[in-house]
Amino acid sequence: MAALVLGGAFLAVWTTIGQSTRFKYAPKPRIAWSGPSPPDVVIFTVSGRCGLRCNAPDANRDYLTETGATEQVASAFNRLGLSTYVLDYRAHLFNAQDGSRDENAQYGFLQLEADFDWVQRNWPASRRVLLGHSHGVNWTHNLLRLHPGWTVDYLIDLDGVCLQWEEDNARYFEAYYASRGGNPWRLDPSKSCNVEPVPSDHGPLLLDVKDVVYPGARSDLEVRTAQGPVRDRTPNRRPEGSTRGLFALVTGESHPATAIVGTKALDWVARTVLRLEEAREPAK
């Protein structure tokens, strides 16, 4: 309940302060790596919606660490002797404090943007991984959509969905654009469902951002479920319509199960990462 109250107060405060700049609107990088050298792999994870009947997006929080999904993906790299550093985010534009979790910070897309930019500039040799589940997949894909020059080695999509995503986030995009005097990006990420025309053998398809693998992604690992009312029904494609570098699994597990350690979905992701890493050419 504390998190829900905070979210409402947060928006009210924003309405009052208007054009002022605050940390939640211009976050600084939060990198806290203590190793003697940069990590071999940096994994950025974005969890999904809090449920069908909840106060989204304010009640959204990072859960991929709790479900073990993050650890299972990291372990695939660790098995090859690669060090990993994980940064977690919630499905929200802004940061917040989640009072239900001992005041642990919850980080949003603007924080992801700042952190990713820092990692790419300062640790260029580190592999970069974007891991999203449900609504989180729209956020991870939007990162590459808005920044064509940014790259990742792996884009991992766990049953991404766009249902309610635009409705959930509209007021926060509006507040952010007002604070900046307009949209600061090259495109409008608030419009992410049925917005990308992609060619196919049967004519142009109008896809959600979550279903488009932008050029910055070297490899895309997509899990879709074959059951339940809330699920990803659309195979991913590149903007030009190809499936180059795309790998997919359709599982009979539920939408929430795709984010739980030890399921067929995450076992497949881990195996595919291992296979692709083993086939990777040694660095020159």
Image (cartoon, helix red, strand yellow):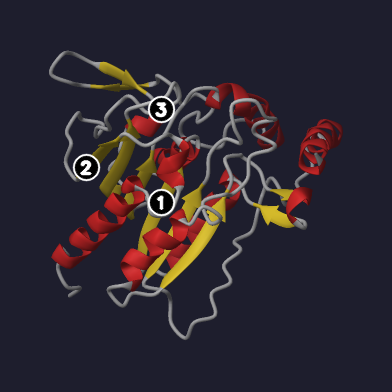
- In the picture, which quadrant includes the N terminus? top right
**Residue 191 % position (x, y):** 49, 24
The vertical placement of 79 against 173, above or below, is below
Vertical position of residue 248 compared to residue 196: above or below: below
Question: In the rendering, which numbered label is found on residue 37?
Answer: none
Q: Secondary structure at mark 3?
A: loop
Q: Which of the numbered marks, if any, corresponds to residue 130?
A: 1
Disc 2 marks which amino acid?
A: Leu
The residue located at (48%, 57%) in the rendering is 68
Q: What separation in Å lies between label 1 and label 2 (alpha carbons)?
A: 14 Å
Residue 65 horizontal/vertical position (percent): 53, 56
Q: Which residue is mark 3?
A: 231
Q: Nearer the viewer, residue 109 or 228?
A: 228
Q: Image height check: is 277 above or below 190?
A: below
Q: Nearer the viewer, residue 29 or 228?
A: 228
Which badge, 1 or 3, is on the more N-terminal residue? 1
Q: Amino acid at mark 1?
A: Leu
Q: Residue at x 37, y 28 (%)?
A: 232
Sequence-earlier tag: 2 or 3: 3
Q: Secondary structure at mark 2?
A: strand
- Label number found at residue 246: 2
- How far apart in space, not on screen, are marks 2 and 3 (Cα)? 19 Å
Q: Quadrant of residue 160?
A: top left
Q: Residues within 10 Å of mark 1 (few under 14, many from 20)?
A: many
Question: What's under tag 3, amino acid-wise?
Answer: Arg
Place residue 165 in its image quadrant: top right
